[in-house]
Image (tube, grey):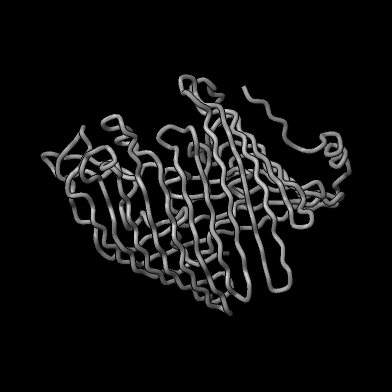
Amino acid sequence: MKKVLLGTSAIALAGAFASPAAAAEWEVRVGGYMEQYVAYGDPDVPGTSNNAAAPGPIGGDYSGIDSKQDSEIFFLPSITLDNGIKIGANIQLEGFQGGDQIDESYMQIKGSFGEILLGSENSAGYKMTYAAPDVSMLNVNSGSTTAFIPYSGTLTGPAPTSASAIVGADVFRGTLGTTFLENEGNNDAQRFTYFSPRFAGFQIGASYARDGRQDSNAQVDEDQELSNIIDIGANYVNSFGDFNIAVSGRWGTADAPAGDNDDPTLWSAGANLGYGGFTIGGSYAVQNKAETESGRSWDAGVSYETGPWGFSFTYFNGENQDDENATLNGIFVDEELEQFLLAARYKLAKGVALHAFGAYVDFDESLDDAGIAGGDDVDGFIIGTGVKINF
């Protein structure tokens, strides 16, 4: 069983709270965002499923112009004590519900000692990660391309065969879809997180979650679920005249449920370099010992911003073991996702931006590694525009 000790001096922190706060006043802000897309997607889905359990035709017509959206409203109460410590909360209400009415929900405590987060939120390493620059609202690293190209989830063919094909199953928080990983895909678990003050450009952070449950106060059996999730991150951010640099790194581990052979680990590194409106950068991430969720991902890109305009080109490549056909003929089978994104953004006003983008997505199952032709492959392109507001 792993042991972990997080936080600063409890005695010093308790002393800091001892000062009276009679003059303090609550401030409650409301913020959030809304994204509205209008885009044409033209995917090519598998004509035949290579899933041995349900072979047969898949096909179907997924092409066309469509409207998609995403939105959240943030409730941000806070109070600053007489001693300068700021205590607040961040509660995020989903405006387009997909099974999770409340997204992140946590308490913040800020002071000269740094910042403490308590509650349902991503890990320290996730929040400190830098990746390839991308001015778009679509994104390809932890992005929304799957809203137009169905490379994630299960595709089902027409009756009477109704054959099914599991395509990319570990896109969210996993190496198939992002370098912003969470160990074995846990998301917004109930955590204790600490961020140090930034000193000479450097900052460190650490998180601990007993288990990976989100929006739950249940005390679960550690033998049955991922537990003792530890995440450590660090980054360096600084400017030297017109030259800007941001570098990040992280490492995480957890206890696997009883019966699993190994405890899962992850690590990643990323960097951005900027000069004269240009930014180049990328990131690389690895998930190990996580069975079918094991894999690696990376991205690279370049952006240019001048006045209200922004332009970027970003490439993402993710790979992990195939959930549907983990082993065939004794060979581990991989699945891979490649994405290319060209984007432009124009800021109409404070918090209002018009976007245009073109993307190509290519998802492949490497069944030929196991001596089987083909695979449940999906590819296609997206051309569209959209408006994003932040308030």
Query: From the viewer's perspective, is residue 327 above or below residue 115?
Result: above
Q: Nearer the viewer, residue 189 or 136?
A: 136
Query: From the viewer's perspective, is residue 263 above or below residue 273?
Result: above
**Residue at the farthest bottom position:** 307
Q: In this view, does 42 lie to the left or right of 188?
A: left
Q: In this view, does 60 lie to the left or right of 389?
A: left
Residue 9 is drawn in which quadrant? top right
Please state, as top left, top right, bottom left or bottom right, where the N terminus lies in the image: top right
Q: Which of 105 and 270 is in front in this view?
A: 270
Q: Residue at x 23, y 52 (%)?
A: 45
Rendering coords of residue 254 (x, y %) = 57, 31
Please state, as top left, top right, bottom left or bottom right, where the C terminus lies in the image: bottom right
Residue 145 is drawn in which quadrant? bottom left
Q: Nearer the viewer, residue 355 or 239?
A: 239
Q: Nearer the viewer, residue 154 or 301?
A: 301
Q: Is residue 38 left or right of residue 375?
A: right
Rendering coords of residue 10 (x, y %) = 82, 34
